[in-house]
Amino acid sequence: MIQVTADEIDAAQLKHALSNPGAGGFCTFEGWVRNENEGREVERLEYEAYEPLVISEGEKVLAEARSRYPYLEARCVHRTGLLEIGDLAVWVGVASAHRDEAFKACRYIIDELKVRLPIWKKEHYVVGESGWVNCERCAEHSQQ
Amino acid sequence: MSDSAKAITVRYFAMFREHAGLGEETLSLNVATAKDVFEQTRHRHGSDEPNGHCKVAINDEMADWSSPVADGDTVLLFPPVAGG
């Protein structure tokens, strides 16, 4: 299951929801808001998502991960809105019979999520400016 | 394929929305493909080149730039994504 939420992510509750008696391994990835990017001091981040396609594409990613690394349970939650330094922006959890599938499926899910789902991140800098991550590079690229 | 004028609803996201100053508009466009829509709305979203970075969806389904667009379609223009 994949979700988008404007509310704080409750990692403990998510972990509990993935309980499975057949699971011998559980792996999570948490993406946190960092105070720096490419040499610029970041004050906060703003996430925008287009939820209908985050859900449909995200479910495809979870299904791909399951076919490659058969797991028992998986869940992913991504925040939207304004986030402060240290906030939890994305949470991925995978429970599987053995650790190898949990590690690999978790890695697959977060890697694909970052490049495929319609989610955008705007950095608000300490100096007062702001910029869309990657989008600025796209604009630079397009002018070359 | 016909390229006569079609009513296309174009949706802009993130950087594109800020550049356009609006999130959505319905335009009468002489277009055959999603790429035609991208190019004909360039003055709105401000990006020159979709390939490799930007993505497109038609009626809430991910699409290719070569995908055909029909009268009444909604075309969603996505700048490069940056989740996580």
Image (cartoon, coloured by chain):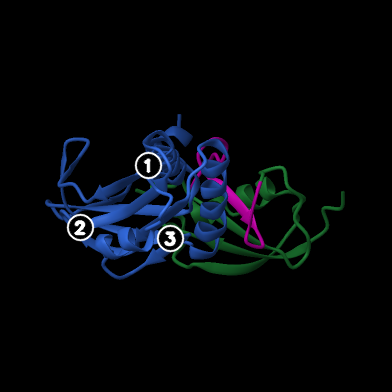
Using the image, tell me which numbered label, if any, was put on residue A62.
none
Q: What residue type is labelled 1?
A: Asn
Neighbourhood count class around disc 2 (C-alpha, 10 Å): few under 14, some 14–19, many 20 upward: some
Q: Which of marks 2 and 1 is nearer the N terminus?
A: 2
Q: Which chain is blue?
A: A
Provide the chain ID for the residue under circle 1.
Answer: A
Same chain for mark 3 and mark 1? The answer is yes
Q: Residue A34 versus residue A91: which sits nearer the camera?
A: A91
Give x and y (percent) for residue B8: 69, 64
Q: Is mark 1 on a helix, strand or loop?
A: loop
Q: Residue at x 32, y 62 (%)?
A: A16
Closer-to-camera residue (A19/A38): A19
Q: Looking at the picture, how far across and down is residue B49, in whole percent?
A: 54, 39
Q: N-terminal of the two: label 3 or label 2?
A: 3
Image coords of residue B58 (percent x, y):
66, 57
Q: What stretch is highlighted in magenta?
A: B47-63
Decide which of tag 3 and tag 1 comes sooner along the chain.
Answer: 3
Q: Could you tell me the amino acid type at mark 3?
A: Ala
Foreground: disc 3 or disc 2: 2
The residue indicated by pointer 3 is: A49
| Kind of residue sitting beneath label 2 | Asp
Chain the render paints green: B
Residue occupied by mark 1: A134
CA separation in Å, label 3 and label 2: 17 Å
Camera-near label (3 vs 1) is 3
**Which residue does the image show at 25% across and 61% down from the upper left?**
A12
Determine whether the residue tagged by mark 2 lies in a helix, strand or loop.
loop
